[in-house]
Amino acid sequence: MTRAAPVDGPATSSIIWRGAGVLGLTAVAVAHLAALRDWGARADYLDAGMVAFAAAAAAAAALLGLRATRADWVGAGAVAAAAAAAYLLSRVVGWPGASADVGRWSSPDGTLALAADLLAFAVVATALSRPSAAPPRTPAVPRSGEPGRSRLPARPPRSDAVSRRVATAVAGLTWALGALTVASALLPAQRDRLRVLAPVIPVPASATATAAAASLGVLLLYLAGGLRRRKRRAWRIAVVVVVVVAASHMAKGLDVEEAAISLGVLGLLVAARREFYAEGDPTTRWLGVRRFAQLLVLDVTLGMLLLQAYDQRVLGHPSVGDRLRHVLLGLVGISGPLRFRSDRAEDVVIATLLGFGLLTALVTAYFVLRPAEPPGRLGPVDEGRLRELLARHGRRDSLGYFALRRDKSVVWSPTGKAAICYRVVHGVLLASGDPIGDPEAWPGAVGEMLELARRHAWVPAVVGCSELGATVYGRHGLHAYELGDEAVVSVPQFTLEGRAMRCVRQAVARVERAGYAARVRRVGELGPNELTELVAAARAWRGGGVERGFSMALSRLGDPADADCVVVTAHRDGALRGLLHFVPWGPDGLSLDLMRRDRSAENGLNELLIVAMIAAAPDLGVTRLSLNFAAFRAALARGERIGAGPVSRLWRMVLVFASRWWQIETLYRFNAKFCPDWTPRYLSFPATRDLPRIALAGLEAEAFLVRPRTLGRLLGTSAGAAEVQVADEREPARR
């Protein structure tokens, strides 16, 4: 007769975890039996309880060695937890007939038994957390270029809102434990407890435990951020760190209270393990630089606080400069100018500062030396498939062609008939425009995008989608907010006649009298020398030092794959003075991508270029032109109407004030000159609380928030990746 395999037991296939559990429970049994040396000195029921705990621990160890089912592991944890709780109650409250034990932390036998109980519980809790912590296994999201490989994965056991709240609560408690651990390590230990601990743990080892507790407390402060975002890797590290923190609290000064709190947090981490399922984010070496700066500031601050806590043990009256020099030298393991009255104080300060320095070095080295994992790029295969979808369905969205930016990743619907291009910025999955492809397949693409965001605990957001796109996203739980309007000019209906077009008509006539002429051509018609000239001119005429654009810009000019794009150039006396770049919008439309001109050129040059494009549009088979995007156009229009309410006028005043830095009102006024049709564009987002984070991600994606290029090149990151390749130009005034 064969024995059934313990399929439901945690880590049952690992002999290491089973052995650790057996050893831990054996230590519990031995420690409680050793405490019976003074048999009869206490109440009979207490002696019987000690025997019962020893017997239960031995039985649990035997079951783990023989079967190790999940029930066996849970029972083992219950035995260890009950034994530890009984001991703590005897020292804090007291059992009937044993009031003398209250506050008697100096008993070596009791301390040994408690340490064995805590160690066994830590082993059981860690083992229980291993097998079922991940969410239910589901088919993977199709990779780029592999449509239809799987069906939409199942949702996590809890709703996303509940999961987020649980993860946030556990992260907050972990952060609190980290702060408590750091504070406990910085404060001098209690002398009476140190005397009890001295026969068991030497003074240097106790100082090392203090340093370990302080360093791991800082690490918990950082891990709390990953736990808040439900990262699986952060949870695994946090479980191990909390176990070590509990042990270090006992070793550094017999801090039973802090150790008990640590075990409580450990229990919460284990209980909420299903909520931490998210995979890691793509990272660059920038994260290592940021972590180094943050940890260095925190190390110096905590080091100064540590010296202040041990101020009574410092010889003399050192200045602030001496203290700071002592901290900075201590971070690299060099003895500083301060001297202490006791060896323990000196050992604790030296070990703690060195622990802070080692933690900073290890964390920085981990992120800087590991291979960079930048967000995925749009490969040739995916780009080719997207172009096929745009050829069939590109007429639906004027922003569709901008999905071909090569700094985006793509997620496909299960059928491969629709796709969404996105970029991940600060934990936000940022898409732009409507899904590409057949609208009937849009829900599948949206579902895959949201599932991808769920797996990584990213915040999904879509910038610049149409009303139809916002409706589809809304059916999947995303809210919509109107960002502004896109100006669309109907070529057959456009005319320069009439009073409404007087300003445009006069501007064009004035520029033409000044000797300017415009030419309209496809990019494929331009020679390499002229393309090089256009790229150089566009780069020189850029207003700022950074190329801007993401959601409504292509980020290149003159690429052979973009031969159908249209370039409008303005010349005076044979010299290039301005240019516009349009991308295809289906077979009969163009969408403005780039608008640049020489700063010394006549005012009205942009009007000349647009009018020339409209005049040449029939020969190119173009009936629609999408011009600039006017953010918050409706709010500006409402606020300037007669009879507008105070809220509308106030909102307009805010927008006009913001226009000093961003071209909000300027673009609206420029677009309105051409009497366009206004098409609203929306922001889709999951919840209002996510808007600040989405706004920050959007500003960085559009390059309104940038990182220093010099440091970016040094680190090999993409901080300066906006530079032109064949031509990588985005127009700061566009959209």
Image (cartoon, grey):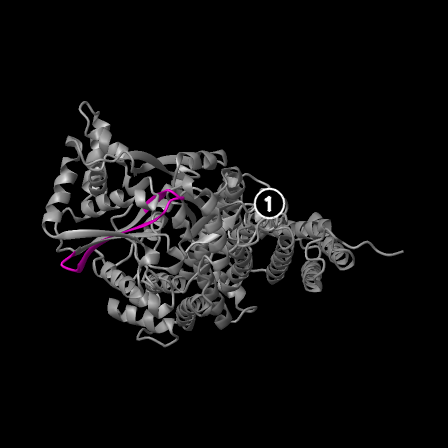
Whether residue 377 is visible to the viewer of this picture, yes or no, is yes
Residue 579 belongs to the span the image colors magenta: yes
**Mark 1 — residue?**
153
Question: Which quarter shows the C terminus?
Answer: top left
Q: Residue at x 38, y 49 (%)?
A: 402
Q: Give the range drawn in magenta.
A: 572-591
Q: Residue at x 36, y 35 (%)?
A: 481
- Give whichever of 562, 324 is nearer the camera: 562
Q: Which residue is drawn at 32% across and 57% down?
A: 525
Q: Which residue is drawn at 63% across and 44% down?
A: 96
> Which quarter of the picture shows residue 332?
bottom left
Query: In the visual, does 360 lie left or right of 532?
Result: right
Q: What secondary structure is the stretch in magenta mostly built from? A: strand
Residue 350 belongs to the span the image colors magenta: no
Q: Residues within 10 Å of mark 1 (few under 14, many from 20)?
A: some
- Give whichever of 51, 655 is nearer the camera: 655
Question: Which quarter shows the N terminus?
Answer: bottom right
Numbered disc total = 1
> Which quarter of the picture shows residue 466?
top left
Q: In this view, does 373 lie above or below 174?
A: below
Q: Where is residue 378 in the image (x, y as percent from the top left)?
A: 45, 57
**Which residue ends up furthest to the top in the rendered image?**
643
**Which residue ends up furthest to the right in the rendered image?**
1
Q: Where is residue 410 in the image (x, y as percent from the top left)?
A: 48, 51
> Which quarter of the picture shows residue 22?
bottom right
Whether residue 341 is visible to the viewer of this picture, yes or no, is no
The amino acid at mark 1 is Pro
